[in-house]
Amino acid sequence: MFLAQEYAPRPEEDASSTLPLESLQQVADPHFLHNCLDSLYQLIQKDQVAASTYMERLSQLHAYVLEHFAKPTVAMREELAFIRSYYELNRLRFGNHLQLKIMIPEKYHQLEVPPMSLQLLLENSIKHNRISAEHPLVVTMVYSPKTAELVVANNLQELPSGPRSASTGVGHWLLTERYKMAGKTAPRISRTEHRYEVRLPLLKRA
């Protein structure tokens, strides 16, 4: 099965200058499809009925990506609806071994984030960690009113190095570029032996 080849930014593209939105979209769309098609390929080996459902839902999610990526920010409620759909898509492959816990009071749902911010982080967690009955992956999204940040974290159980787990850094690069375009501080990343955490600054509608 043909899989889309993922694009990794060249070193000169990581400079402090912000790339045009069109350039980011030329990276984001293939990046999204590459990882989704890779998951689809894995699912086809196990359950062709679930794979068919996956394809139908993927087309709906891709429509969201095409419609919203060009916007500088989207309301948290829109992004949460998208991330829940993306989560359910991946549960077709991983079942209850993948868990997403969202703890964001509704009064903060009008705050904004760059489009696909949450999806990129969930995608990153899925790609780089073991997910099984013995090693369930739990991703949490919690709003911190003290710092006005969304804290996205997961238990760290990294896959052995290999072609499927190798990181190109595209996801975090895209996040950083989107925040630079919004004139905001880049997300903060931290990790311990057992936990990986990203803090996303939330934005108010201009």
Image (cartoon, rainbow, N blue to C red):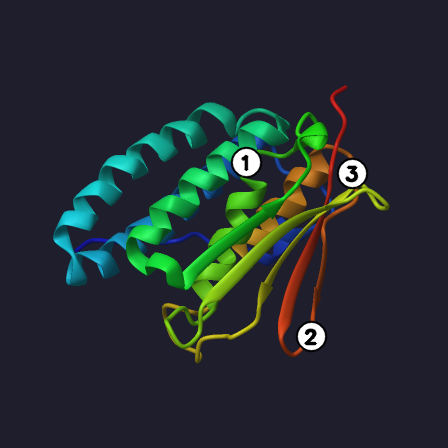
Query: Cα distance, mark 2 to mark 1?
Result: 27 Å
Question: Which residue: 45% across, 75% down?
Answer: 159
Residue at the image point whose x is 68% and y is 25% from the top? 110
Residue 67 visible: yes
Q: Amino acid at mark 1?
A: Leu
- Amino acid type, mark 3: Lys
The residue at which mark 2 appears reads as 192
First in sequence: mark 2 vs mark 1: 1
Q: Is residue 193 above or below residue 57?
A: below
State which mark lies toward you, 1 or 3.
1
Residue 8 location (% of width, % of height): 49, 55
Q: Going by the picture, which residue comes out furthest to the top?
A: 206
Q: Residues within 10 Å of mark 3 (few under 14, many from 20)?
A: some
Which residue is identified by label 1? 80
Q: Provide the residue designation for mark 3.
A: 184
Report the quarter where the N terminus lies: bottom left
